[in-house]
Amino acid sequence: MIKKIELLSPAGNAEIGIAAVDCGADAVYIGAPKFGARKAAGTSIEDIKRLTEYAHPFGVNVFAAVNTLFYDEEIEEVRRLIFDLYDAGIDGIIFQDFGLLEMDLPPVKIIASTQTDNYHPERIRFIDSIGVDRIILARELSLRQIKEISQTTQAELEFFVHGALCVSFSGRCYISKALFDRSGNRGECAQFCRMAFDLLDENENPIIKNRYPLSLKDLNLSDYLKDLIDAGISSFKIEGRLKDVNYVKNVTAFYRNLLDEIIDNSDEIERASVGKSYADFVPAPEKSFNRGFTSFFINGKADRLASLSTPKSTGELIGKVIKSGEGFIKLNNKKDITTGDGLCYFDNEGNLNGFYVNKIANDSIFYDGNFVVPKNTDIYRNFDRLFEKKLELKTERKIDISFLISLDERSISIKAECEDGVSVSKKFEVEFTPPAKENAFIELLKKQFSKTGNTIYNVKNVGVDKGKISFLAISQINGFRRETLKELTKLRVEYHEKKRTSFFKPRYTNYYKKEIDYRENVVNRLAENFYIKCGAEKIERGLDYTEEFQNKPLMTSRYCILEEIGICRKTTGGNSKAYYLKNRNGKFELKFDCKNCLMEVYIR
C-alpha cells in the first residue's frame, strides 16, 4: 500500500493558511477561536470556513487546534465550539485535554497534540490503544526512538521538522502560570524561557551572566526527511502559528521542494494532496526568522542547542568585517546586499546589535550612527529587503487537467479529468450551425478550453473528437468551460468530504498507572471520568487547577544547561554542586537527573 506523505503548515489566520496552501502545504493547522495553545492566534469560525473552502478542492486538510486544558464550567462551550468547527469544514481536531474524548465528537480526525506528553513509549502506546487517528510525537525523540514507536503503533505519526523549540517537554511547563498567571496549557505562555538569566553555583558565584540559557535555537530537520519517512513519520509539521505570512510561505515552499524530490524517487510513497505551486522566489529558510538552527535530539546526542546570546532572530551569516570606521563596514565577500537590508552582529560583550543599510558605495556598506563595528566581526542579515518583496508577490497553485470534447450537430459533450483521476462529464444541447472553416473552429475550441482564468486549474491537453460539428460562439464555449470547471470543483470538494465518515469513540484500555499525579493535567470532571474508565484509582488534579507549585518541577527538559556550557556532571567527575538561575522574577533551582539526562526547574 502506498503511503501518503503530508506537509503540515501553520496558519495564524485564513490569509496565511491560504498562502500555505498555495505554496504546497498538504494540510494546514489553525487555532480555534478559543482553547488553542496559541491564544494570540485564535481564528474566527468564518475565517476557518473560508480556509476550508479554499483548501478542500486541492485535497488539503484543515486541522483545528483545540489543544488547551479546559475547566468544568467551560465544557459546554468546548462542545459547541467543536461542532461549529465541524460545520465550518475542518478535517480534524488537535486536542490536549482527554476530557474532550468524553464528548460526542463529529466525524473528523482526532489528533493527540504534543501537549499530551508523547515522549515515553508506554504513554504513546496507551494513546494509540484508545483509538486516536494521529499522535504528534515529542520533539525530543530520536530517529531510533521514532522507529521503535512506529513499529508498535497503529495511529498516524506526526513530527515537527522546523521552527521554534520549547525547552520543556510540551504539556509539562507550569512556570509561566506560577510566575505570571499565564498558563502555557491555556495558550498564554509568557515565554519565560526567552528571558535573560544569571547562572549561579551554590555559593552564588556567577557562571554566566545576563544570558539566555533556556532559549533554544530553532529546529531544522531538512536533512532528515527521508530518514524520518523511513522511521515511520507521515506528517511533517512546521511550527509557527504566530509567524507572519512571508515566513510561512518561505518555509512551506522549502519543505515542499525537498519532499517532492524524495517522493519523485520512490514508488512506495505519494503526496497527500494535489496541485503544483508556482512562486517567484527561491525558498531559503535562513532568510526568515531564526535563532540559528539545530537538529535537536534527532541523532540521540544533542549538538549545541541554545541561542545563549539572544532570543532574537540572527538570520543568515553573510560575511566578516575586513575594514570599518564610523558609519561603514567592508566585508570579505560581495554577497548581494541592498539598501534597506537589516544587518546585525554580536559586540565584544556578546550582545546583539543591528542597523539598516543606508547606502552601498565602493564595496562599502554605510549605516546611520557613529559607532564602529570591530574588524573580524561576523555580520548577519536578518532582513533581506528584496527577498521579502518577492515573498509578497502572489503565489499560485494549480491542478493539472485535461479536456476531452465530443461534438455532434445537437450537442457538445465535455469531460474534464484531473491529475489524480477525479473527473466530471457535462453535456450541453446546441442548435446546429455548420462552421465556415471546420479546422479553424477546432483550433478555436482548443484555444478557449486552454484558458482557465482565475481558477485552480491548469490545462495540459485538449482533445476533440470530430463528429458533425456545430459552430459555437466564443461566449458559448467559455460558458460551457466555466460550467464544467465549476462542476469539477464541486465534485472535488464532495470527494474530499466523503472521507469524513467515521465517528470517534474511545476504547477504554487500561492505563499503565493506577495513580495519576498532577503531570497528567486533569483539570475537569470529563478528564477524570476518562482516566477512571481506563482503570485509574487515584487522580490528583493538575497544577492549572490546584496552583500548588511549591516543591514541584515546573519545567522538565531533556536539554541540560550544564552539558550546554561544558560542565556536564557525567563527563566532569560527578560534580554535585547546586545550580540556580536568577533574574528579576526570582531565583530558580536546577535539579539534574543524570541517569535519564533530564533537567528540572523549581521555584525557590
Image (cartoon, rainbow, N blue to C red):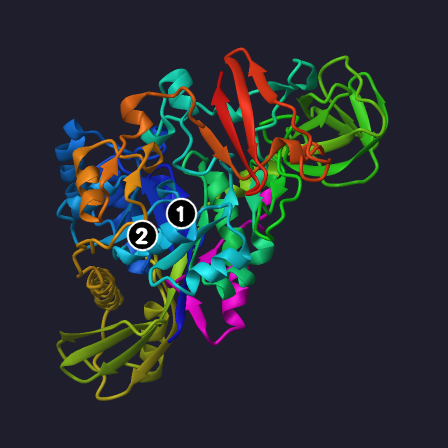
> In this image, 23 relative to 51: left or right?
right
Q: Amino acid at mark 1?
A: Asn
Say which residue label 2 marks.
127
In this orientation, which residue lies closer to the viewer: 554 or 111? 554
Would residue 484 appear left or right of 544 to someone viewing this image? left
Query: Which residue matches tag 1?
Result: 118
Label 2 with label 1: CB-CB less than 8 Å: yes
Disc 1 secondary structure class: loop
Which stretch did the figure color magenta? 257-286
The residue under label 2 is which amino acid type? Answer: Ile
In what quadrant of the picture does the N terminus appear?
A: bottom left
In this rendering, is residue 279 above or below 72?
below
Q: Earlier in the sequence, mark 2 or mark 1?
A: 1
Query: In the rendering, at what x and y percent does residue 556 appear?
Result: 48, 34
In front of the other: 65 or 184: 184
Q: CA distance from mark 2 to mark 1?
A: 9 Å
Left or right: 451 as drawn, with respect to 296: left
Instruction: Identify the residue at horizontal 20%, vertical 56% (top origin).
Output: 507
Work out whether residue 133 can be spotted: yes
Viewer-nearest residue: 106 or 584: 584
